[in-house]
Image (cartoon, coloured by chain):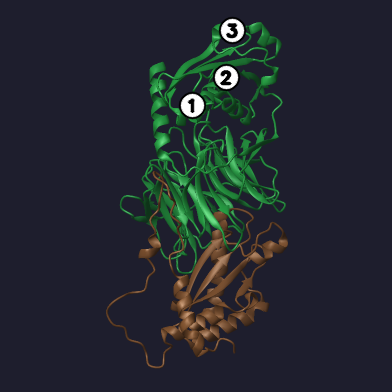
Chain colours: A green, B brown
């Protein structure tokens, strides 16, 4: 188990290191706007760093990840009376007195130039039980990912939920003022750090969508002054234009098997309908046949039906349509409020996150598919948009406005924990969370 | 009428337009491993080359069309933009004059084309807004065709909320962004 885990780590470290280029120098400012009073106290003790090693502060990154989830509260270093680096050095009674439920300790060693062995152990302070003990092999560039992986392990060991800290997000960043805007497609770590520009244009970029294997992004580009859908491989930057029909080419959504895209196209009269695009043959299959706006398709987990936005009943609402041959009708599944759009399915397939119009404001809500579309509004902004679930289903990332500027925000799916990630410049739009294990 | 052509403007107009149509879409990233997208604009949307072409006698020359387009597109904003109410795509009567002007010019110059760019404010869902912007562009297309403009002279594009005319998050800004821009193309 240990070996298997470590080799998987190593592979991911190597791959992520080689995958992305164009670092953007940006420090995200995390602000937790609503916290959870039941956050679990944990001590994340600074790891020992041998002389000559990178000063990168692994423990600080782990603490930020855990705090950012809202489910943990890491102890301030000023309050630590001791700095153990292994289980044998922990005096449990001291940490019990400091009201810490868990303690994470670790050490780095440098067996060769630019090689790191990172040991870490997690203990339950009350029972003295060791919950985790692993070694990660990596290099300097991989230390950040190693930290996210340690946070993932702690999250899983304590909460029983797979952590999603070592995953990535994509979003659109708009720089400059009209009419001199620059649109960037950015891929970053899930905490917003280490952002890389993967595409840039003076014309709009929209609707990034991760392939199920996390290797590619589909998106809409207006670089020809008309919308086209592209698929870009992140590893080498190779781009393929997969849809450039006359009229609208929008809202790409990958099928669960990665072979098809659901897309929105229009006819000459400007009627938007949803089609399936086979990526190998480029064959199109029409799915919706309605004179209203049908768009924002999203596949069901089994790939047998699509959720989408349609204004066939007046305002935009969420519908579901079977993809079975000969299936005609679509079933409306949202009924609360007059505006519901952009459905995004939870990883377990039980809920849709949507943009809902509430008294002139636009907010993120979840819609319970098992209970007649019961909705819970999670956010409190004026113009919140583009929800996307974390692959573990614990959080939803979306775009909101703070001080008139578009920024990234996160909300736990129970609505109790909220935070914003303010980028240093530009307007953040359409964040999408990548899948687990993009290796 | 200000859209009559001035001969002295014709050549410069054509040159300016040609310059504007250069590849401006994609800036390449000076990076090693990442997506350095090639510029597909270079291979699409170009005019045909080689061979011969036939033009009806008395038709506008390319230079005349270019000057006509240039002068129309240089007109004040309120002569080439139609604004819409929130979540609406009906053309209000105050814009009948703009529609009639464009219809007359396009009917008189069959070689001239117009591009209708539909836009929305930035509230709500971005992809749904693409649908709304397209609906607005189509409303203007229908109005032009009702006044005799040939379908082949009209193209539409929806930018949704992605290309606002002005920055801002209040009703003043939103009202200026819910619009169709009429753009002549020679």
Circle 2 residue: A158
Q: Secondary structure at mark 1?
A: helix
Q: Secondary structure at mark 3?
A: loop
Residue A189 is situated, as x and y percent measured from the top left of the image, at 52, 37
Residue A60 is situated, as x and y percent measured from the top left of the image, at 59, 26
Instruction: Give the distance between the C-alpha atoms of the residues marked 2 and 1, in whole angstroms.
Output: 18 Å
Work out whether residue B63 or residue A310 is closer to the camera in this orientation and state it: B63
Residue A372 is situated, as x and y percent measured from the top left of the image, at 60, 41
Residue B153 is situated, as x and y percent measured from the top left of the image, at 46, 78
Left or right for A277, reference A371: left
Left or right for B100, reference A285: right
Q: Nearer the viewer, mark 2 or mark 3?
A: 3
Q: Residue at x 42, y 47 (%)?
A: B31
Circle 1 residue: A146
Q: Is residue A324 visible?
A: no
- On residue A128, which mark appears? 3
In the image, residue B34 sits, relative to residue A50, either above or below, namely below
In the image, residue A138 sits, relative to residue A242, either above or below, namely above
Please state the chain letter of the residue tagged with numbered disc 1 in the rendered image: A
Q: Is residue B6 visible?
A: yes
In the image, residue A258 sits, relative to residue B106, either above or below, namely above
Left or right for A53, reference A238: right
Instruction: Give the distance between the C-alpha atoms of the residues marked 1 and 3, in whole angstroms.
Output: 25 Å
Q: Is label 2 in contact with label 3 (beta carbons under 8 Å)?
A: no
Disc 3: CA contacts within 10 A as few (<14), some (14-19) or many (>=20): some
Q: Are marks 1 and 3 on the same chain?
A: yes
Work out whether residue A152 or residue A136 is closer to the camera in this orientation and state it: A136
Please state the chain letter of the residue tagged with numbered disc 2 in the rendered image: A
> Where is residue A30, by image quadrant?
top right
Q: Earlier in the sequence, mark 2 or mark 3?
A: 3
Disc 1: CA contacts within 10 A as few (<14), some (14-19) or many (>=20): many
């Amino acid at each position: 188990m240990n070996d298997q885990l470590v080799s998987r780590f190593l592979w991911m470290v190597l791959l992520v290191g080689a995958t992305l280029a164009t670092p953007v120098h940006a420090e995200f400012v995390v602000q937790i706007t609503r916290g959870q009073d039941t956050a679990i106290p944990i001590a994340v003790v600074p790891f020992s760093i041998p002389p000559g090693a990178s000063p990168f502060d692994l423990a600080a990154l782990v603490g930020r990840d855990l705090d950012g989830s809202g489910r943990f509260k890491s102890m301030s270093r000023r309050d630590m009376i001791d700095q153990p680096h292994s289980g044998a050095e922990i005096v449990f009674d001291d940490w019990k007195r400091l009201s810490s439920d868990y303690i994470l300790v670790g050490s780095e060693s440098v067996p060769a130039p630019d090689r790191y062995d990172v040991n870490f152990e997690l203990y339950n302070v009350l029972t003295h039980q060791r919950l985790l003990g692993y070694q990660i092999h990596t290099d300097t560039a991989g230390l950040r990912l190693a930290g996210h992986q340690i946070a993932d392990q702690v999250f899983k060991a304590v909460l029983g939920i797979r952590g999603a800290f070592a995953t990535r997000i994509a979003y659109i960043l708009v720089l400059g003022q009209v009419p001199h805007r620059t649109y960037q497609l950015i891929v970053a770590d899930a905490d917003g750090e280490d952002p890389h520009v993967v595409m840039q244009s003076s014309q709009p970029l929209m609707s990034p969508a991760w392939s199920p294997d996390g290797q590619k992004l589909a998106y809409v580009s207006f670089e020809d002054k008309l919308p086209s859908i592209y698929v870009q491989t992140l590893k080498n930057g190779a781009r393929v234009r997969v849809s450039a029909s006359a009229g609208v080419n929008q809202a790409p959504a990958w099928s669960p098997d990665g072979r098809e895209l659901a897309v929105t196209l229009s006819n000459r009269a400007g009627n938007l309908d949803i089609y399936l695009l086979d990526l190998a043959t480029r064959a199109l299959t029409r799915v919706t046949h309605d004179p209203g706006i049908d768009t924002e398709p999203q596949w069901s987990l089994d790939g047998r039906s699509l959720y989408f936005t349609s204004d066939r009943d007046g305002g935009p609402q969420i519908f579901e349509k079977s993809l079975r041959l000969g299936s005609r009708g679509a079933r409306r599944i949202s009924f609360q409020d007059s505006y519901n759009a952009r459905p995004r399915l939870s990883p377990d397939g039980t809920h849709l996150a949507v943009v809902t119009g509430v008294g002139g404001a636009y907010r993120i809500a979840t819609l319970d598919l098992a209970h007649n579309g019961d909705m819970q509004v999670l956010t409190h902004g004026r113009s919140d948009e583009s929800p996307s679930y974390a692959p573990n289903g614990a959080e939803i990332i979306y775009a909101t406005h703070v001080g008139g500027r578009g920024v990234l925000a996160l909300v736990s799916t129970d609505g109790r924990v909220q935070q914003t990630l303010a980028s240093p410049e530009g307007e953040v739009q359409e964040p999408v969370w990548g899948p687990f294990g993009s290796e | 009428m200000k859209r009559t052509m001035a001969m002295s403007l014709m050549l410069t107009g054509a040159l300016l337009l040609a310059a504007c149509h250069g590849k401006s879409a994609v800036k390449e990233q000076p990076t090693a491993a990442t997506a350095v997208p090639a510029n597909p604009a270079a291979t699409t949307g170009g005019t045909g080359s080689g061979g011969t072409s036939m033009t009806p006698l008395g038709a506008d020359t390319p230079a005349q069309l270019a000057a006509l387009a240039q002068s129309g597109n240089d007109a004040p904003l309120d002569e080439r933009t139609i604004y819409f109410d929130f979540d609406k795509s009906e053309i209000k009567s105050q814009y009948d004059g703009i529609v009639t002007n464009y219809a007359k010019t396009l009917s008189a110059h069959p070689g001239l084309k117009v591009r209708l760019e539909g836009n929305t404010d930035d509230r709500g869902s971005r992809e749904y807004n693409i649908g709304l912007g397209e609906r607005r562009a189509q409303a203007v297309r229908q109005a032009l065709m009702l006044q005799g403009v040939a379908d082949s002279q009209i193209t539409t594009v929806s930018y949704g909320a992605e290309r606002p005319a002005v920055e801002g998050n209040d009703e003043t800004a939103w009202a200026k962004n819910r619009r169709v821009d009429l753009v002549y193309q020679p």
